[in-house]
Image (cartoon, helix red, strand yellow):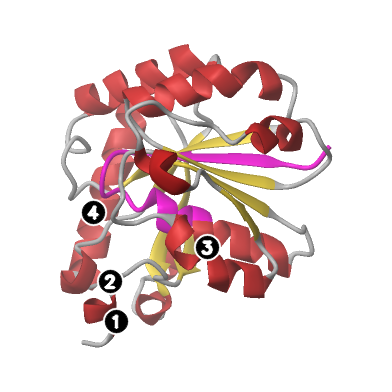
Amino acid sequence: MRHLAIFSGGFGSGKTEIAVNFALQGMKNNESPILIDLDFVNPFFASRDVKGMLAESGVRLVAPSGELAFGDVPQVPPEVLGLLQQDNSIYLDLAGDEVGATVLGYLSRFIQDRPCDFYLVLNPYRPFAGTSSELQNLRELLQKAGRRRFTAIISNPNLVEDTNLEVIMEGHRRVLELADALQLPVSCLTVEERFYNELPPEYQKITRTIKLYLRPEWLQES
C-alpha cells in the first residue's frame, strides 16, 4: 500500500500551500498522487482554488463542492473513504482545530493500518503557534480524535511578502525550540526557492523549496 501524508496546522501556518507542493512533487516521483482537501475552515487559501493547475500537472484533487464546501458541518466526500482503502499515494490537507479533529476522528478507522506521515506545520509568526502550551493543546486535540500521533514538524517560517533571510533563520530557530518542547523531530524547513542559496549550508541540508500557488492575484502581480 502506498503512502499517506496528513498536513495539519493552525490558521496561517501554510499547510495548504505545503500540501499542494508535496502532492506536485509526488507527481514528479511517478506516484499518481491524490490531494484531498478537507480543510473546511479557511476559505481564503484552499487547494480548490488551483484545481485546474493541479489537474494539468497530473494531481487528482478531491474536495467538497457547492454550498457545503465551507459549511458549519463538515461534509466528507464519500469517495474519500474508498480512496483511503486503496493502493494509492494520498496527501490530505486537514484543518488544525476542532473541525479538523472531528474529520480526523471520522476517518481514523479507515487509515488505522496505513503507513502515514502526520505533519504539524508551524509558522511561528502566526497566532496560536508562539508557545509550546498552545501547540501542546492542538496536538492533544488532534491526536486524541484521530488516534494517531504526529510524526514530525514542518518548519515554515515566513511573513509572506516581508519574508527575508533573517525572518527565516530566526523563525526556524523558534520552531526548533518548540519542536524540542513537543519532543517531535523537524522533518524539513520549507522556503521559497529564491531564498535557498542565501541559507547557510547546515540549513540547506534540511531545506525543501516550495512555490507559492495560493497567493491572491494582487500579490502575484506586485
How many residues crowd around disc 3 within 10 Å: few (fewer than 14), some, or many (20 or more)?
some
Q: Do the residues labelled 1 and 2 touch (CB within 8 Å)?
A: yes
Q: Specify whether residue 148 is in view.
A: no
Under circle 2, the secondary element is loop
Look at label 1 and name its amino acid: Gln
In-front residue for pair 202/19 = 19
Look at label 3 and name its amino acid: Asn
Give how far across and how far down residue 185 sits, in percent: 47, 37
The residue that label 3 is drawn on is 21
Q: Are marks 4 and 3 in contact (CB under 8 Å)?
A: no
Q: Is residue 139 above or below residue 77?
A: above
* Total marks placed: 4
Under circle 3, the secondary element is helix
Q: Image quarter for residue 189?
A: bottom left
Real-space Cα separation, disc 2 to disc 3, in angstroms: 17 Å
Q: Is residue 99 above or below residue 199?
A: above
Real-space Cα separation, disc 4 to disc 3, in angstroms: 21 Å
Depth check, mark 4 against mark 1: the one in front is 1
Q: Do the residues labelled 2 and 4 touch (CB within 8 Å)?
A: no
Q: Give the range drawn in magenta.
A: 1-19
Q: Which of pointers 4 and 1 lies earlier in the amino acid sequence?
A: 4
The residue that label 2 is drawn on is 216
Q: Which of pointers 2 and 3 lies earlier in the amino acid sequence?
A: 3
Look at label 2 and name its amino acid: Pro
The residue that label 1 is drawn on is 220
